[in-house]
């Protein structure tokens, strides 16, 4: 048995300024009342959510998904204007005290891109120079705000390219979480292997199952608990969902998971433990699709 047996790592993705400002405090309260620690990933640049409007024309199923989830109630009208008719506010720089609170309460703080929309929609097509410029920028802001170098990164939209891994290895990150998969691994992409640990999201996100599995909170909680394995489970939550309308779902899920004997850990602690395991495999990363999500994501594939 390893220390990751019956373990859940909660990965919190902050996508918007409103999610940072109003969703993070809700999640901190949930984690604090349950005495668990999580990993928060925050964009280092501006909120340009309004620019996602182009996905209506470029991503099959995007409009259907936004209708299921309720895009206006989830994000709010003002957020949907950022980057279009309103200048996008700085997500990290305008919430420094909240960032300090995350760290002070013992949670992990990692990076979720610089411009979330730009990374999500364009990183697949970036060359090495553009990739390095984007990464240097987000690493610099993190260092400016936190005072140390980041140890972790989570890709917006689970989209990555092979140049990213080379740069992360050069910058000595402990791990990154950029894929959908089943278990931690060392990545191989475009024929090249990389020595930076990859911790994939193993469970579906809430926006992928709302309106498909159910829109009832109790049914969704039961669904997620039934998906848990006896090994390591990585659950990505969003400040705009579980930090807002669906906070009750997250509270109930944590309660039920604890009743079934699951414990919770930060991804950085999981990564530090796994890095010492010589049995951690190397797996391929490929672009593909998953149920309930519009467009491509990076997917873990076993070799052979």
Image (cartoon, grey):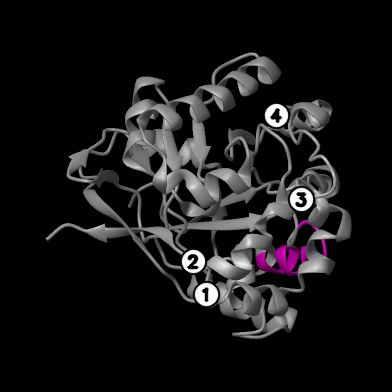
Give the prevailing secondary structure in the magenta stretch. helix
N-term mark: 1 or 3: 3
N-term mark: 2 or 3: 3
Q: Which residue is mark 4?
A: 103
> Around disc 3, counting alpha carbons within 10 Å, would you say few (fewer than 14), some (14 to 19), or many (20 or more)?
many
Q: In the depicted view, which residue is nearer to us: 85 or 301?
A: 85
Residue 189 shows which numbered tag? none
Does 171 sit above or below residue 300? above
Q: Which residue is mark 1?
A: 60
Residue located 82% across and 30% down the image: 94
> Marks 1 and 4: in contact by CB < 8 Å?
no
Is residue 291 a member of the stretch shown in magenta?
no
> Marks 3 and 1: in contact by CB < 8 Å?
no
**Front position among marks 2 and 3:** 2
Residue located 58% across and 35% down the image: 111
Q: What percent of the width, then of the height, locates residue 101?
A: 78, 31
Residue located 30% across and 47% down the image: 185
SS at mark 1? loop
Side of 257 relative to 199 (left or right): right
Does 286 sit above or below residue 212? above
> Around disc 2, counting alpha carbons within 10 Å, would you say few (fewer than 14), some (14 to 19), or many (20 or more)?
some
Which quadrant of the figure contains the C terminus? bottom left
Q: Report the Cα–Cα distance between label 2 and label 1.
A: 7 Å
Does 270 sit above or below residue 158? above
Q: Which residue is mark 2?
A: 295
Magenta-tinted stretch: 243-253
Q: What percent of the width, then of the height, locates residue 91?
A: 75, 36
Residue 27 shows which numbered tag? 3
Side of 249 relative to 304 (left or right): right
N-term mark: 4 or 1: 1
């Amino acid at each position: 048995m390893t220390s990751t047996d019956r373990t859940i790592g909660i990965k919190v993705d902050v996508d918007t300024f409103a999610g940072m400002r109003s969703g993070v405090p809700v999640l901190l309260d949930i984690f604090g009342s349950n005495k668990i620690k999580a990993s928060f990933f925050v964009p280092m640049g501006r909120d340009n959510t309004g620019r996602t409007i182009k996905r209506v024309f470029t991503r099959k199923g995007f409009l259907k998904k936004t209708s299921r989830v309720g895009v206006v109630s989830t994000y709010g009208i003002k957020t949907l204007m950022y980057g279009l008719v309103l200048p996008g506010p700085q997500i990290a720089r305008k919430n420094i005290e909240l960032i300090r609170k995350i760290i002070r309460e013992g949670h992990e703080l990692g990076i979720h891109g610089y411009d979330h929309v730009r990374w999500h929609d364009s990183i697949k097509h970036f060359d090495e120079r553009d990739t390095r410029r984007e990464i240097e920028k987000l690493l610099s802001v993190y260092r400016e705000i936190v005072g140390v170098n980041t140890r972790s990164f989570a890709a917006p939209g689970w989209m990555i390219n092979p140049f990213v891994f080379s740069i992360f290895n050069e910058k000595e990150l402990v791990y990154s979480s950029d894929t959908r998969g089943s278990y931690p691994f060392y990545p191989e992409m475009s024929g090249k292997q990389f020595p930076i640990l990859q911790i994939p999201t193993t469970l579906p996100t809430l926006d992928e199952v709302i309106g498909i599995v159910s829109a009832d909170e109790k049914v969704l909680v039961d669904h997620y608990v039934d998906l848990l394995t006896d090994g390591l489970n990585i659950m990505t939550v969003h400040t705009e969902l579980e930090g807002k309308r669906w906070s009750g779902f997250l509270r109930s899920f944590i309660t039920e998971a604890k009743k079934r004997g699951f414990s919770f850990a930060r991804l950085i602690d999981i990564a530090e433990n796994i890095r010492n395991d010589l049995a951690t495999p190397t797996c391929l990363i490929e672009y593909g699709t998953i149920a309930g999500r519009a467009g491509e994501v990076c997917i873990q594939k076993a070799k052979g």
